[in-house]
Image: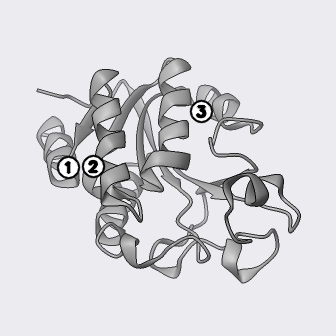
Amino acid sequence: MMSLREDVREAVIIVDMQKDNVGRFCGEIIPNIKLLIDDARRRGRPVIYACDSRFRDDPLFRKLEFPEHAIRGTKGAEVIDEIKPQQGDILVEKRMLSAFFGTDLDYTLRHKNIKSLIIAGIRTEACLLKTVLDAFELGYDVTVPSDACSSPSQQNHEATLKILDVLKIRKVTTEQLLAVVEADQK
């Protein structure tokens, strides 16, 4: 059984849950992400928002054939209201897919003695996957709540979760994760 011991510091990373990014495919995960955030705050754990931060001429738009989105300084780049950051939360602006690439996220986590990460958000097969893989390669213990991440393609979502199985990256439901947390506190 998984255990989240008090001596192992953990943080929750929420990937790309911004107004321009969240679509119909995200509706079911928002309540689960909110539960994860509320639990982390209640337990004094860092909540980190890894957010797209794009320029209008961002090369990723052309490479991936994506429309402009999450342009710096626009309303669309803001985290959705349902889970908006509060004082003390950390916002990481990212130019690429991974929350680690070209940011100070790893330094921030190590400074706070974080060893374990719960990573949720969108898109399962892109920014979430890249963030999870980088965290794994940097030596963090990673948990992905499978019902707190999503993709416009259910097929891509499921295929990505299978890749995480191959790498032995822990996948649980939000309910299972919170039950473990509750049991550890008793």
Whether residue 47 can be seen here: yes
Give the percent coordinates (x, y) of residue 28.
28, 72
- Residue at the (58%, 70%) spot, across then down: 18
Give the percent coordinates (x, y) of residue 32.
29, 63
CA distance separating discs 2 and 1: 6 Å
Kind of residue indicated by mark 2: Ser
Quarter of the image where the N terminus is located: top left
Tell me whether circle 2 and circle 3 mark residues in contact (CB < 8 Å).
no
| Among numbered discs 2 and 3, the one appearing first in the sequence | 3
Instruction: Tell me if 165 is positioned left or right of 123 in this view.
Output: left
Instruction: Tell me if 151 is positioned left or right of 72 in this view.
Output: left
- Residue at the (78%, 70%) spot, across then down: 71
* Disc 2: which residue: 146
Instruction: Tell me the mark number nearer the camera, choosing from 3 and 1.
Output: 1
* Disc 1: which residue: 173
What element does badge 3 sit on? helix
Kind of residue indicated by mark 3: Leu
Instruction: Tell me the mark number nearer the camera, choosing from 2 and 3.
Output: 2
Q: Residues within 10 Å of mark 1 (few under 14, many from 20)?
A: some
